[in-house]
């Protein structure tokens, strides 16, 4: 649930404080995504979201139930998230109101083996997912619910000629959210993998 979904219009508008330069670096690129079924359980709270043992269970095929299992797709290259596209509709009182913000994330997978090809093929069986993403500075985005109803266009392997290394794939992830999730520091996720 986003902030806008629970906002009470009768409440005070709130305050905004711009931080000092260099206070927090949320990262410049996305290095790993975590993909689950659309009905995967939410995390209990932000403390659970930032707890390594909770993630170890969710990433374990034996410790997590099939419905709650998350797949880590890491070592991403060029993981970028440009500004969201806004969708508006005409408001009854005049002007436009924000309906949704379409967010897109693009990333490349450059290191392949037969196991990864099989895993990606299994992920292609679904149209939508619940997703979290991790930046290069160790901040996790997606909140306790993950980005729900996310679609991922899993690109196929590309072979770009001799001297360009092994094949890569270019992928696009799309989700709709009115507000941005509040990032959680979770650097330990950089090294966690599925077991």
Image: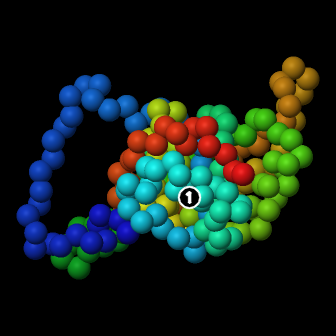
**Do we see residue 34 in this rendering?**
no
Find residue 97 and report its image quarter: bottom left
Which secondary structure, mark 1? strand
Residue at 38%, 62% in the rendered image: 45
Residue beneath disc 1: 131
**Do we see residue 67 in this rendering?**
yes
Residue at 72%, 51% in the rendered image: 195
Task: Describe residue 134's horizontal placement relative to residue 37 as left or right.
Answer: left
Foreground pick, 86 / 40: 40
Q: Is residue 52 above or below residue 175?
A: above
Total numbered labels placed on residues in the image: 1
Residue at 67%, 57% in the rendered image: 60
Picture coordinates of residue 62, whole percent (x, y): 71, 63
Residue at 21%, 28% in the rendered image: 20
Task: Describe residue 11's horizontal placement relative to residue 152 as left or right.
Answer: left
Picture coordinates of residue 188, whole percent (x, y): 52, 39
Q: Is residue 13 above or below residue 105?
A: below
Q: Residue furthest top?
A: 163
């Amino acid at each position: 649930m986003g902030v806008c979904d629970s906002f009470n219009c009768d409440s005070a508008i709130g305050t905004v404080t711009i931080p000092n330069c260099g206070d927090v670096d949320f990262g410049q690129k996305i290095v790993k995504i975590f993909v689950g079924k659309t009905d995967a359980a939410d995390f209990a709270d932000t403390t659970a979201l930032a707890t390594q043992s909770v993630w170890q269970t969710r990433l374990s095929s034996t410790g997590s139930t099939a419905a709650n299992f998350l797949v880590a797709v890491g070592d991403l290259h060029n993981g970028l998230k440009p500004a969201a596209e806004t969708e508006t509709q005409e408001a009854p009182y005049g002007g436009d109101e924000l309906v949704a913000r379409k967010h897109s994330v693009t990333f490349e997978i450059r290191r392949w083996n037969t196991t990864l090809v099989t895993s990606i093929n299994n992920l292609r069986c679904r149209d939508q997912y619940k997703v979290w993403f991790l930046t290069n500075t160790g901040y996790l985005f997606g909140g306790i619910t993950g980005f729900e109803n996310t679609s991922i266009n899993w690109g196929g392997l590309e072979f770009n000629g001799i001297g360009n290394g092994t094949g890569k794939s270019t992928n696009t992830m799309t989700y709709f959210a009115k507000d941005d999730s509040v990032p959680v520091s979770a650097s330990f996720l950089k090294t966690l993998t599925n077991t």
